[in-house]
Amino acid sequence: AQSVTQLDSQVPVFEEAPVELRCNYSSSVSVYLFWYVQYPNQGLQLLLKYLSGSTLVKGINGFEAEFNKSQTSFHLRKPSVHISDTAEYFCAVSEPGGYNKLIFGAGTRLAVHP
Amino acid sequence: EAGVVQSPRYKIIEKKQPVAFWCNPISGHNTLYWYLQNLGQGPELLIRYENEEAVDDSQLPKDRFSAERLKGVDSTLKIQPAELGDSAVYLCASSFPQGEQFFGPGTRLTVL
């Protein structure tokens, strides 16, 4: 069975500092990997996804993530955060062939301080 | 273009009462999902529809939860009777077959 572990439940950071949100997954097969963002009282929005090919994936709002198969990781990074990046971030995995069965991690709360 | 619409946004009920949530997916999306999001957790799939057929309901607690999507568009998720542990956010999402899921804002349920 697949599972996702987000290693930090909360990440505080100052505005304009870099940030990394960590995600590890377990699966016996190849996977698709996703990062979603959830702003307060809103639904989830897709930030970026890895399906195949280049292991460095660029997404919206200046975020990027790197797929590392040997470490089964898919960490999310941003070189300079803004106050507006304060939100909950979810890493998710699905089996290849579709997005239908998403397994989510517990989420990481990113708090950007001035 | 309108996104996924859910109503109500908030619902407070007493335990043992019934409750229903409604979802209108993005136009043209054949696949519809209901997720449960407990506080401090990621969403967990309850049920997935392809048109009007429930193709994955393995995680739906069928003793008290039910769902329908009669005409393959709107969907309703019902809980009867509600328990204290059902307090959570119920998310609806839709997609084209095998496509990216788009999420609604959710219904926050509080059971007293």
Image (cartoon, coloured by chain):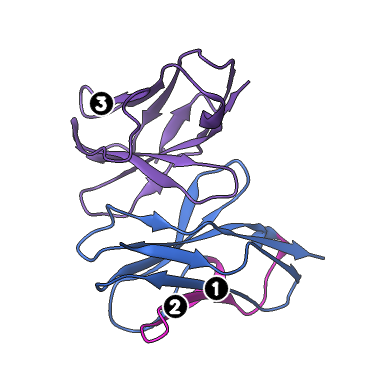
Chain colours: A blue, B purple
Mark 1 lies on residue: A22
Please give the label number shown on residue A73. Answer: 2
Question: Does any portion of residue A59 appear in the rendered image?
Answer: yes
**In-image side of B76 versus A82 (left or right):** left
Q: Which residues are magenta?
A: A61-83
The type of residue carrying mark 2 is Ser
**In-image side of B74 versus A35 (left or right):** left
Badge 3 marks a residue whose secondary structure is: loop
- Residue with the most extreme right position: A114
Q: Is residue B20 above or below residue A4?
A: above
Mark 3 lies on residue: B69
Subunit under mark 1:
A
Q: Give the distance between the C-alpha atoms of the residues marked 1 and 3, in whole angstroms.
A: 37 Å
The type of residue carrying mark 1 is Arg
Q: Is residue A90 above or below residue B30?
A: below
Which badge, 1 or 2, is on the more N-terminal residue? Answer: 1
Between circles 3 and 2, the one closer to the viewer is 2
The type of residue carrying mark 3 is Arg
Marks 3, 2 in one chain: no
Q: Nearer the viewer, residue A17 or A91?
A: A91
Please say if the residues under marks 1 and 2 sit with CB atoms less than 8 Å apart: yes
Q: Nearer the viewer, residue A21 or A27?
A: A27
Q: Is residue A106 above or below residue B82?
A: below
Please give the label number shown on residue A53. Answer: none
Q: Residue at x 35, y 50 (%)?
A: B101
Instruction: Mark 2: give few (<14), some (14-19) or many (20+) Cα within 10 Å.
Output: many
